[in-house]
Image (spheres, rainbow, N blue to C red):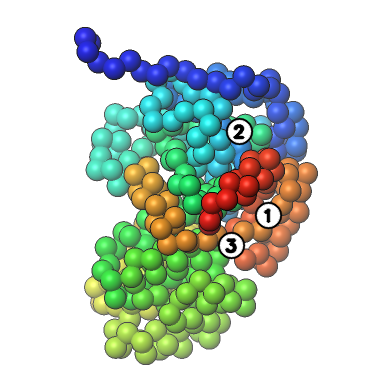
């Protein structure tokens, strides 16, 4: 069209190798295999190639390993990553080589279904996408990763690679769960599983939005992290359902929390989440146990509304990063040095003793450069 600006066209750094190391699931129910694979240089028009700085481990990675997600093997793990753009597709807008980015799980949404067409808050539900990084296509446990620019976000200067990678899924997921009930400042939000990888972020997000937070967890490590991250009230779920409800009602004028977010896959967690929620309130179910079991009285006699919630939309994710930068929200991470230590990370996560999120430092040089920048980073 006459007068229309020209697209910038593809860009690429000059030193991209042909081969890289990646940690892949090559056989179900077996450990990752670290092996040499091709660098994915064949970029679609809206793709970015990033040099991965940090890759994060998520519960879904275990579901992939255990053949729950229908993954075709081999598949490079991790759908939570951060890094630096080293090449762009021909139609990419808003990104250049050298940009620091966070990218998550969705690859090539169809852009034609009802969800893709909006509202924006539902665009992540596209059922016709080209795949899911780390699940149906290769992810971030690799030196380089191919991602969809429409699903990526530039990282604010204050946000570090180590913070951004876990936010790509865990952060996006619990951020949407916190904002979904549309609470206002001063209302009470309960979080069940508040000391886990998602939960400790949810506590901080809720406080940043001016909410009062009740953190409920069943592990000493989780209770400690809940308190550290600013929950107004901390309740030990091991006290039992009746006592937990009693403790919540003590601080909510006998009503219960206006809304509750459940990020625990314990078989009793959904029922407890509903029980601590006020009548006509909302319980947001994020955890993915085989079955979600709730007594009928909760949603019939007490009209507790149960909402499921997935990852957030791209725009919600960018807003989340702004909140992280503005409020100095931190991710409690357990860093491991390179793919050679990936099974140590898996062992820690499966042992039930991990506080926060486990990450792999894929490129120490990017981390070093970041720390030498002089910026006050979170």
Q: Is residue 372 above or below residue 179?
A: above
In the image, is 15 to the left or to the right of 328? right
Q: CA distance from mark 3 to mark 2?
A: 23 Å
Percent across and percent down for residue 142 are 66, 36
Q: Nearer the viewer, residue 320 or 4?
A: 4
Identify the residue at horizontal 47%, vertical 61% (top origin).
328
For marks 3 and 2, the one nearer the N-term is 2
Q: Residue 332: give its label.
A: 3
Q: Secondary structure at mark 2?
A: strand
Q: Determine crowd level at label 3: few under 14, some 14-19, many 20+ residues with C-alpha closer than 10 A.
A: many
Q: Determine crowd level at label 1: few under 14, some 14-19, many 20+ residues with C-alpha closer than 10 A.
A: some
Q: Nearer the viewer, residue 308 or 369?
A: 369
Q: Nearer the viewer, residue 63 or 189?
A: 189
- Give the farthest residue toward the top: 2
Identify the residue at horizontal 54%, vertical 70% (top origin).
195
Percent across and percent down for residue 325 are 44, 55
Q: CA distance from mark 2 to mark 1?
A: 18 Å
Q: CA distance from mark 3 to mark 1?
A: 10 Å
Identify the residue at horizontal 70%, vertical 64% (top origin).
351
Percent across and percent down for residue 152 are 44, 38
Percent across and percent down for residue 89 are 46, 21
Q: Secondary structure at mark 3?
A: loop
| Residue 135 visible in rendering | no
- Give the farthest residue toward the front: 374
Q: Residue 30: give its label.
A: none
Q: Secondary structure at mark 1?
A: strand
Identify the residue at horizontal 28%, vertical 43% (top origin).
120
Q: Quadrant of residue 13?
A: top right
On the image, numbered disc 1 is attached to which residue? 335
On the image, numbered disc 2 is attached to which residue? 51
């Amino acid at each position: 069209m006459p007068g229309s600006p020209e697209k910038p066209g593809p860009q690429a750094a000059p030193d991209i190798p042909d081969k890289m190391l990646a940690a892949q699931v090559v056989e179900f129910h077996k450990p990752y295999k670290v092996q040499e694979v091709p660098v994915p240089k064949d970029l679609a028009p809206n793709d970015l190639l990033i040099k991965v700085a940090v890759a994060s481990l998520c519960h879904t990675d275990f579901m992939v390993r255990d053949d729950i997600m229908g993954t075709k093997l081999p598949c490079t793990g991790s759908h939570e990553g951060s890094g630096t753009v080293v090449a762009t597709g021909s139609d990419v807008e808003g990104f250049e080589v050298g940009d620091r980015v966070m990218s998550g799980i969705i690859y090539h949404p169809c852009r034609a279904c009802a969800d893709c067409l909006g509202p924006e808050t539902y665009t992540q539900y596209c059922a016709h996408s080209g795949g899911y990084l780390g699940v149906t296509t290769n992810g971030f446990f690799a030196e380089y990763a191919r991602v969809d620019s429409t699903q990526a976000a530039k990282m604010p200067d204050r946000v570090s690679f180590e913070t951004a990678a876990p936010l790509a899924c865990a952060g996006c997921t619990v951020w949407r769960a916190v904002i979904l009930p549309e609470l206002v400042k001063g209302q009470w939000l309960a979080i069940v599983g508040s000391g886990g990888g998602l939960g400790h972020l949810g506590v901080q997000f809720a406080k940043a939005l001016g909410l009062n937070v009740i953190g409920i967890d069943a592990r000493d490590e989780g209770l400690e992290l809940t308190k550290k991250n600013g929950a107004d009230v901390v309740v030990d779920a091991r006290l039992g359902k009746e006592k937990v409800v009693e403790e919540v009602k003590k601080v909510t004028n006998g009503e219960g929390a206006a809304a509750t977010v459940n990020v625990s896959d314990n078989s009793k967690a959904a029922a407890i989440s509903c029980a601590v929620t006020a009548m006509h309130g909302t319980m947001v179910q994020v955890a993915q146990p085989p079955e979600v079991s709730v007594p009928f009285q909760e949603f019939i006699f007490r009209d507790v509304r149960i909402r499921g919630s997935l990852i957030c939309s791209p725009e919600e994710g960018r807003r989340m990063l702004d909140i992280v930068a503005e409020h100095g929200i931190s991710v409690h991470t357990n860093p491991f040095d390179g793919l050679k230590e990936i099974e140590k990370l898996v062992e820690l996560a499966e042992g039930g003793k991990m506080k926060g999120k486990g990450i792999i430092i894929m490129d120490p040089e990017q981390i070093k450069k970041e720390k030498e920048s002089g910026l006050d980073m979170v």
